[in-house]
Image (spheres, rainbow, N blue to C red):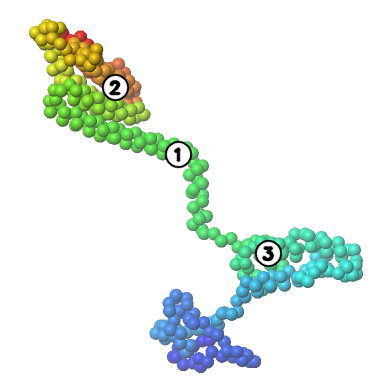
Amino acid sequence: MLIANRGGSGSGSGVGSVSGRTRPIKLRAACTQCNAGKVKCSGEKTGCERCRNLDLQCIYMESRVGKVPGVRARKRSVHQHINIPRPDHNGNFAISQSMNGPPSASTLLSDGNDSLVHWATDSNGHGSDIDLLERTLRQPDDQMTESSELMPPSSIDSELILPEMDFDIDDLLRYPNEQSQYDSSPTALPVNEEQDGRRRAELDSQCVLVCCQIASELESYMVADIKSLRIVLGIVRKGVERLNDAVGLQQGSRNFRCMAMFGVILYQIIELLESGCACFLDKTANRKDSFAVQIQGMLPGIALGGFGMDPEEQSSWRSHIVLKEIQQTSEVLNRIKKLMAVGESGASKGPSTPEEREKCFVDLEIRLKALSEKVASPK
């Protein structure tokens, strides 16, 4: 260790004062003050710039470069410690196996039977040389520190039996918290209920948005005042299919807002059917009293081979198609009535009964039934 003067004066030769030592002492590149402060040192052995400015004692420690043993040196020192004989339980030194080979027979016989028994029990027992060698070879090389090399064999055994545990205090504190999440099963129930409620609210909002889009499109068709039965039936068929899909969203989550939107869409569908069938029903009624129908049998008709359709058959075919669409609409209405009778999801029993809630759609049923009778038997 070299201590530099504060005033900047010093020998700076870097040669040790121990008598008989001719090799110069290698000092560290940074002084202790700069090394502790984690700053760059200018490196003047007579006193670095930082120590001079702060008026500190500039000390350069001896460098350990080339003095720390490598991996092979550590292994060799471990084998040397293993070969050192240790006293047994009776205070006698047991004969350990050397690195060159097993002991000779004359040596074993000269020690007597007692020594042979002690040697056998000591070599196979816990903490023996062979046991120490096996435990040493199983450990990685980076766990063998320099301090263990300087310890006696008895302290080496304790170090090998109790290796250093490398863990972080944050990890140790975090494990109980993670375990408590799995152990606390009663506290997980409110979380599941909250997630179910949030999921139902999302489904209800999605259903309302879908119904608003369907109602907007149907309303635009109603404003256009379409009279063609073929176009009206195509619009109604598509609207009923989309309404049926929206009703499917409410099977697991029933909400009165969605059911009210279902009623709005059903009113639009029925009005479109009524407006499209009005022209068809008027033409059918007028055709029966017309002169063309009376003389139709006297005129040749256009047909494909033996198959032909007169106006009566065409009217019957149109009625069949319209009745089919009315039947599809009635089935969707029945599904909505069942949902309304069950009531809203997650709500307590309200003042209204299932029968009273079903009466909200009585007007729709009456209008569908009246339209079906008109189409089935036009006057």
User: What's the CA distance linking mark 3 and mark 1?
Assistant: 48 Å
Task: List the residue tagged with mark 1.
Answer: 188
Question: In the depicted view, which residue is nearer to us: 167 or 286?
Answer: 286
Residue type, numbered disc 1: Ala
Question: In the depicted view, which residue is nearer to us: 250 or 316?
Answer: 316
Residue type, numbered disc 3: Thr
Residue type, numbered disc 2: Val
Badge 1: how crowded within 10 Å, few (<14), some, or many (20+)?
Answer: few
Task: Where is residue 115? Give x, y as percent.
Answer: 87, 65
- Label 3's element? helix
Vertical side of 354 occupied by 128: above or below: below
Task: List the residue tagged with mark 2.
Answer: 332
Q: Residue at x 11, y 7 (%)?
A: 295
Task: List the residue tagged with mark 3.
Answer: 136
Task: Where is residue 325? Give x, y as percent.
Answer: 25, 20
Mark closer to the chain start, 2 or 3: 3
The number of callouts visible is 3
Q: Image quarter for residue 289?
A: top left
- Viewed as shown, does residue 190 lie left or right of 65? left
Badge 2: how crowded within 10 Å, few (<14), some, or many (20+)?
Answer: some
Task: Where is residue 165? Give x, y as percent.
Answer: 58, 60
User: What's the CA distance linking mark 2 and mark 1?
Assistant: 39 Å
- Viewed as shown, does residue 69 lie left or right of 257? right
Mark closer to the chain start, 2 or 1: 1
Task: Where is residue 275? Give x, y as percent.
Answer: 15, 20
Q: Image quarter for residue 292?
A: top left
